[in-house]
Image (cartoon, rainbow, N blue to C red):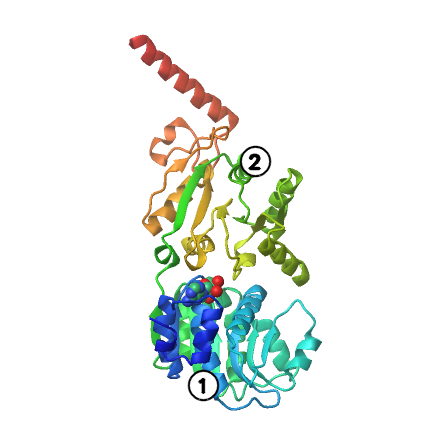
Amino acid sequence: MTFASLGLSPALAQACAEAGFHVPSPIQVEAIPPLLRGQDLLGLAPTGSGKTAAYVLPLLQRLLAGRQRAFRRVRVLVLVPTRELAAQVGDVILRLDPPSDRRLKIAVVHGGVSVNPQMLHLRGGADIVVATPGRLLDLLDRNALRLDALEVLVLDEADRLLDLGFAAERERVLAALPARRQNLLFSATFPEDVQALADALLHEAVRVEAASQVEAVPEIEQRTIAVDAPRRTELLRHLVEQGSWRRVLVFVATRYATEHVAHKLASRGVQAAPLHGEMSQSQRTRVLQDFREGALDVLVTTDLAARGIDVPGLDVVVNYDLPRSTDDYVHRIGRTARAGARGVALSFVSAGTEAHMRLIEKRQDVRLAREQVAGFEPVEVELPAPADAGTGGIKGRRPSKKDKLRAAAAKARDEGSQGSGA
Ligand code: AMP
């Protein structure tokens, strides 16, 4: 299977080869032909499946063959949930835009940076605008762009768009669009609100599905390590040093934890930095750049801030805190082993999170051994199930010092009596 055999022009097939894409990924095989025919499309595809190029390539072919852009008019709008993803989609477009007499005009617009240069850039219209919803509405309110001649609308990571409040903004965006247009909706998961969005937007859509990342990239080695929660940072440092890990993405639960963990690692000589949503755009860009270029070994982040980050050659993804949902777990571990490379996903499991890890495993139909690292063996015990609650401990509560002493004394008694009986 080649890109040309999917109906792409020789120039675009050549651009793919130059980008290092030698064979189309499964989602590209399925999505490119119907998109070239102008059909609506519903893509169930996680990041890492090659979905961006799956829609960018047909868009480029259409734009290069179509009419010229007009004053303030936008021909293709790609809506994305985060600034990082906006920048990344913009990069993919620039990378795949083949050299030709007609250069396409691409505008990437998102919040966190000054609006004026964006307004100026849009004056002559744009072939493709990649935008986050808030900034798009801001630009519409300022009359900086017009969507009434839009040919194609793409909603990328629609589940995250909705999580971030896009439902409220949706009507305003849709009201600005012409009735006749091509619609593409991509989402990693398919909850009810995404279904409702698809129903409202799509007409006779082709449905394509990329296998979930875990299946699509079996090269991800999933591992779990049992460790007491207070010793996780120390263990992380130990593993980074021992394994000489050079590109580690660490997920924690809160913005505060990103800073706390990164700071602790840095104070022990590890090149680590936090990445979270409260940082300015320039700070975020710099940290990501440092991480990509290898000036940083460890990036400590949250699910939201990590959305859309594409760092090639990630050694390890570490779940320092477990994600709340299985979807997030799949999304996180898919950050390693991207585009076929091999990767490791490591989760720290402690007494308090054991039950949650089992739930994640169950949903994925896997059972992972709890490894232990010498010197970091856990001493906290898992809480007893309610059935044998008579031994003390309340579900959801960590055992107190007294509980542990009692348990240790009981164990010593048991062992002692066994010994004397033998
Ligand atoms: P995406 O799912 O769009 O975030 O893409 C994930 C990664 O796969 C990106 O780093 C792309 O550059 C890369 N990629 C996309 N399509 C291909 C392909 N056909 N062959 C190799 N790599 C690809």
- Where's residue 319, x and y in %? 49, 46
**Above or below: residue 215 compared with residue 12:** above
- The amino acid sitting under disc 2 is Glu
- Where's residue 157, x and y in %? 47, 67
- The amino acid sitting under disc 1 is Arg
Q: Which mark is residue 181?
A: 1
- Where's residue 396, x and y in %? 45, 39
Beta carbon of the mark 2 residue lies under 8 A of ligand 1: no
Q: Which residue is mark 2?
A: 234
Residue at disc 1, secondary structure = loop
Identified at 46% across, 37% down, the residue is 350
Q: CA distance from mark 2 to mark 1?
A: 54 Å
Q: Earlier in the sequence, mark 2 or mark 1?
A: 1
Q: Quadrant of the C terminus?
A: top left
Residue 201 visible in this rendered orientation of the protein: yes
**Above or below: residue 233 compared with residue 203:** above
Quadrant location, ligand no. 1 = bottom left
Q: Quadrant of the N terminus?
A: bottom left
Q: Residues within 10 Å of mark 2 (few under 14, many from 20)?
A: some
Q: Which mark is residue 264?
A: none
Q: Nearer the viewer, residue 12 or 337?
A: 12
Where, by quadrant of the figure, is residue 8 drawn? bottom left
Q: Nearer the viewer, residue 50 or 307?
A: 50
Residue at disc 2, secondary structure = helix
Identified at 42% across, 41% down, the residue is 224
